[in-house]
Amino acid sequence: MTARKGTLLAVVLAATTPPGARAEDRPTFPGMSADTYQNFSEMIAGGIHGVGVPEAASCPPESASVHLRASRIGRACRGYYDRMMADGELSFGIGIGYLDPAVDGNSPNDRFLTIVDQLTTPCSSGVTFACGFERSDLYIRGGGGRRLDGTDFTVLTKRITYTDSGGRTRSTVVRVNVCNPYSASTVASVRTNQQTTCSAQFSQSLRYDDVTTYIGHSRYGGGPDFSPPLTTGTGEARHEDHDYYERTRPGVRRFFTPAALAPPASSTRARPDYKQLYMLSCSSAEHFGATVRTNAAAAGYGPDSFDFVGTRNPVDDDGTEALRLLDSIGTGTCASGIARDVRDSDDSRFSASATEGFQMIGRPPILDTRSLFNPGR
């Protein structure tokens, strides 16, 4: 059973974006300073980790916890799974980059529905991890305590049982946080709020989640992007402004600096002992690998504490690759198996949302996993 739980609220003063400003290009929430944006991201992290988790005994059989045993995990990676599970929680953040219906032919709403619908589906013999989650929808309150439209994000929770390499068994909380940057609102400020909320959700995931995944555009090396693209040309000739993204790299400057990869000094939450970042976007190994690894070290991660995994090819994503990745990790798969599972677009266990006009061209991610579970390599 995947009952919807009560909505958890955080409080932040509402703000507006100056006319003509593109919020995603500035390290702020619309109309806010960088410090306030950071605080906003921290609020989202607090909301995510404040969502209650059902007791294992209350889970019905179809969504009962997976019992993952380190003894069944390959020797090359079982120690890393022990580290991810050591605090009794396994956390995933999924960033869904913005797709412009006018340019891409579909929207991030498709990916969001694909992921959330599957994760809240009762478990079956074919899927034992990426299923059976309880869903909680959260939002932000603005000035006067009223709901700030366009600040929605979703947290999904369940419990599994993990037996580590030393034979110790514990109940482990699994949290998945995901945000849909698409808003059907006709109000520009609401659409901007939603895009920046997803930006802040991704920011907090980079700092605190064991596993962070991004699906969407690489923006020609510009980095993760949760807002409509900057375009040039008109009509059928309209396309992303390649020069702008290659020259300014706005997403890299926002998300992949040392400061962005580490919790702020004021935070009461610790970063993961062992972190994985998967960029399931076009040619991300080449675009971001060296920068992320260098800046993760500058952020204080040791040589065996941060894994970046990128793709070696152009990618067409539909959300199912994120589900295959989640299920692969949640069942204790090592590097070559994760690469195989993510690439397996013929995996009939997961299907994309049947939104009208949504179509996959068919280039699944080919992951560069040479350093996965061996990040000092």
Image: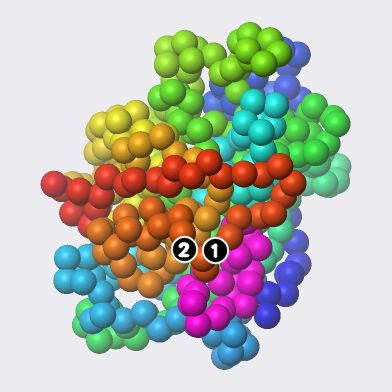
In the rendered view of the protein, which quadrant contains the N terminus? bottom right
Residue at left 73%, top 70%?
5
In the image, taking residue 87 as reference, residue 19 lies left or right, namely: right
Residue at left 33%, top 71%?
332
Q: How many marks?
A: 2
Q: On residue 347, which mark appears?
A: 2
Which stretch appears magenta? 113-133
- Residue 127 falls inside the magenta stretch: yes
Please say if 48 is above or below 110.
Answer: below
Q: On residue 350, which mark appears?
A: 1
Residue 193 in sight from this viewpoint: yes
Which percent across, then down, holds residue 137?
71, 58
- Residue 227 falls inside the magenta stretch: no
Identity of the amino acid at label 1?
Phe
Which percent across, then down, holds residue 161?
42, 82
Please say if 254 is above or below 207.
Answer: above
The image quarter in which residue 344 lies: bottom left
Please say if 76 is above or below 278.
Answer: below
Identity of the amino acid at label 2?
Asp
Please say if 327 is above or below 104.
Answer: below
Which percent across, then down, holds residue 328?
39, 65
Element under disc 2: loop
In the image, taking residue 346 as reference, residue 60 lies left or right, namely: right
Badge 1 local density, few (<14 within 10 Å), some, or many (20+)? some
Question: Given contact means CB atoms under 8 Å apart, are the residues at marks 2 and 1 in contact?
Answer: yes
In the image, taking residue 328 as reference, residue 130 lies left or right, namely: right
Residue at left 13%, top 46%?
377
In the image, taking residue 259 as reference, residue 351 lies left or right, namely: right
